[in-house]
Image (cartoon, rainbow, N blue to C red):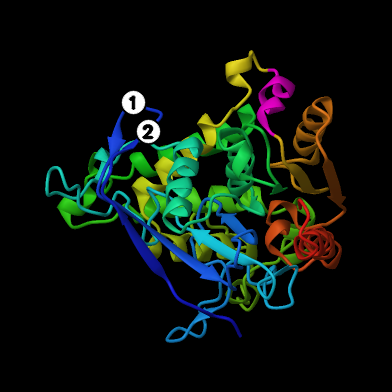
Amino acid sequence: MLIAQSQSMLFEAPLPLQSGASIRGYSLSYETYGTLNADKSNAVLICHALNASHHVAGVYADQPKNLGWWDNMIGPGKSLDTDRFFVIGVNNLGSCFGSTGPMHVNPDTGRVYGADFPVVTVEDWVNAQARLLDALGIQQLAAVMGGSLGGMQALSWTLQYPERVKHAVVVASAPNLNAENIAFNEVARRAIVTDPDFHNGHFVAQGVVPKRGLRIARMIGHITYLSDDVMNEKFGRELREAVTHNTTGYKYSTQEVEFQIESYLRYQGDKFSEYFDANTYLLITRALDYFDPARAYGGDLSKALARSSCKFLLVSFSTDWRFSPARSREMVKALLDNRRDVSYAEIDAPHGHDAFLLDDARYLNVVRSYFDNMAKTLNEGGAA
């Protein structure tokens, strides 16, 4: 088993943000796996989605059950082989897994940021990641890779730093959110900000946590990550065991948990509320909403992606209705309009959006084949 070690790097210089604000004295948490080769040409950056972190693969020596969120994809002999590539996982600014975020102290005030943490965007995260790579002495990436919101970051890398990326692997993602996705994010945010324990985002000072809002936000989100087929297969209309063992039949209650799917969603919500920060949820979902590289080009994605110069692999999943295959095909078309080198795989999988995290052999083999070809070119000393 790969043993991971969390690291942290402090950046004193201010980072200008798209909002016009800036942030200084911030830290980024990260992990690395594998060995950087002599010419530093085998580095792969992994960008994380909403509630993930820099802990991408392996386990910690003192936490053997804390498995990296993409461990099925990354590691020795896996699709992204850490025996051949130097893989970097970074926790984004504003997150709650080590990098500076709303739960940290603002060096300018000496108080916890809370709701005063500056709004961050996908582009801001990419700029912060670029600074980390500079500090690590890595000028060009063999690849940048991410799923969902991580895929948006990977795409943004190809536009903000086209000369620093040879390959981009964009999985279960989109060039922007549609209105339905923005609506889901807004409902989740309203659940949080209307929780009486939110206190306008300064709940830490009150010694409370808006757990009710976080629970509902997670329940809403979780529904969108699964397909209808998966939910029916896993839960259907099954009642909880306590209900089925009740000899009087249904309780006919409007408030009790009676169905298995209700129990599952409440469990997910309870678990999420114990470890995720409410202000972080607001920040990250808003970053999702804002991302739209075509906006500056009158909505013309082909013109927006003309800045890219690397090779691409895009992967989508047939039952992913939150980031549907049609959105990946939009990106494929825009890249082909610019005569970019593009590979595309549309996997017929039943798992919905969560498929990008799961063990589908076809999906894992597509990624493996892509990185195998990349490694072969690197070994031959060519332009991957």
* Real-space Cα separation, disc 2 to disc 1, in angstroms: 6 Å
The residue tagged 1 is 20
Left or right: where does residue 73 sit relative to residue 282? right
* Image location of residue 109, percent across then percent down: 12, 43
- Which residue is tagged 2? 17
Q: Is residue 382 left or right of residue 94?
A: right
Amino acid at circle 1: Gly
Q: Position of residue 237 (x, y in %)?
A: 72, 61
Q: Quadrant of residue 235?
A: bottom right
Element marked by disc 1: loop
Badge 2 element: loop
Report if residue 309 lies within the magenta region. Answer: no
Mark 2 and mark 1 residues within 8 Å of each other at the beta carbon:
yes
First to last magenta residue range: 300-308
Residue pictured at 74% horizontal, 77% vertical? 77
Q: In which quarter of the image is residue 88?
A: bottom right
Q: Is residue 305 magenta-colored? A: yes
